[in-house]
Image: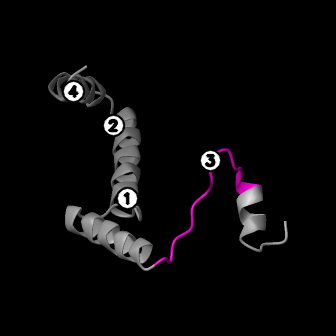
Amino acid sequence: MTAIQLKAEVMHNINVVAEDENMLNRVAKYLRKLVAERQTDSTEMTKEAFFAKLERGEKAYERGECHEILPGEDLTTYLRRRGYDI
């Protein structure tokens, strides 16, 4: 389903629900909740911030500040190799 089709379906359903005030209040409450979640998404970043983060990671790798899991190595083995007592 395309975004245009999805928008049309949502608008149609809102028009149907708008005839019942109780249902409309429930929809409004749910939409407020969704909007609040959207505004507080801590993982969201701008394109510029994303590429700046990648660049910082590449520079850290070049300075030897990064470590890697070896092929076939699991996380527990990796952490033990790094000196963690697991």
Q: How far apart are marks 1 and 4 (CA)?
A: 23 Å
Find residue 24 and name its label: 2
> What segment is highlighted magenta in the picture?
64-76
* Secondary structure type for disc 2: helix
Residue neighbourhood size for the residue with mark 4, other residues' Cα within 10 Å, grouped as few (<14), some (14–19), many (≥20): few
Looking at the image, which residue is at 25% across and 28% down? 10
Sequence-wise, which precedes: disc 4 or disc 3? 4
Please state which of residues 25 and 45 is positioned toward the viewer in this rendering. Answer: 45
Residue where numbered disc 4 is placed: 15
Residue where numbered disc 1 is placed: 36
* Secondary structure type for disc 3: loop
Looking at the image, which residue is at 41% across and 40% down? 26
Secondary structure mainly formed by the magenta segment = loop
* Secondary structure type for disc 4: helix
Q: How far apart are marks 1 and 2 (CA)?
A: 18 Å
Q: What residue type is labelled 4?
A: Asn
Q: What residue type is labelled 1?
A: Ala
Residue neighbourhood size for the residue with mark 2, other residues' Cα within 10 Å, grouped as few (<14), some (14–19), many (≥20): some
Residue where numbered disc 3 is placed: 71
Q: What residue type is labelled 3?
A: Pro
Q: Does the magenta stretch include residue 80?
A: no
Sequence-wise, which precedes: disc 1 or disc 2? 2
* Secondary structure type for disc 1: helix
